[in-house]
């Protein structure tokens, strides 16, 4: 799995992003993990739907279009839920309440840059 950094509002943030861009990596997602650090996120490339069946912790979910524009933000998504955003090209998953702490809002531009 590739690692990168989140770029939000034109600035590189202290958020480390795991990039899931293969079918297996996207299918696995955050399943099987006991938690996620507050400065970590999972970027699912080519993904417009997620589920939290089998998840051990709540997450925030951000749907992003092909230009990197945030289409919707879902906070504190509990287990056994399914979310879909038909216009999304990718999805950012993070620990519950992280989207609010990082000030991610609808209309923001997000991207990731390769770790150096």
Image (spheres, rainbow, N blue to C red):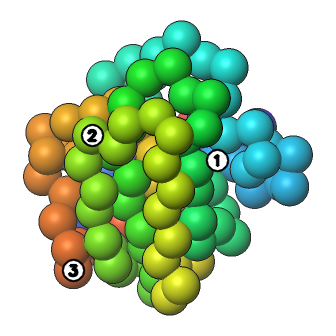
Residue beneath label 1, please?
19
Q: Quadrant of the C terminus?
A: top right
Helix, strand or loop at label 2? It is strand
Residue beneath label 2, please?
76
Name the residue at 84% across, 54% down: 22
Q: CA distance from mark 1 to mark 2?
A: 21 Å
Residue 54 placement: quadrant: top right
Mark 3 Cα shell of 10 Å, populated few (<14), some (14-19), many (≥20): few
Query: Is any part of residue 107 visible from this angle?
Result: yes
Q: CA distance from mark 3 to mark 1?
A: 22 Å
Mark 1 Cα shell of 10 Å, populated few (<14), some (14-19), many (≥20): many
Q: CA distance from mark 2 to mark 3?
A: 20 Å
3 or 1: tag closer to the N-terminus: 1
Q: Quadrant of the N terminus?
A: top right
Where residue 6 appears, as percent x and y from the top left, is 40, 49
For residue 107, the mark is: 3
Name the residue at 68% across, 20% down: 32
Helix, strand or loop at label 1? It is strand
Report the front residue among 80 and 72. 80
């Amino acid at each position: 799995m590739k690692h990168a950094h989140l770029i939000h509002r034109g600035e590189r943030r202290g958020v480390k992003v795991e990039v899931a861009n293969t079918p297996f990596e996207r299918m696995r997602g955050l399943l099987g993990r006991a938690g996620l650090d507050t400065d970590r996120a999972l970027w699912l490339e080519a993904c417009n739907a997620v589920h939290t069946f089998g998840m051990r912790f709540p997450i925030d979910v951000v749907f992003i279009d092909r230009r990197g524009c945030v289409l919707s933000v879902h906070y504190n998504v509990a287990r056994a839920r399914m979310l879909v955003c038909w216009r999304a090209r990718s999805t950012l998953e993070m620990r519950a309440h992280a989207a609010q702490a990082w000030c991610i809002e609808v209309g923001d531009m997000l991207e990731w840059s390769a770790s150096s």
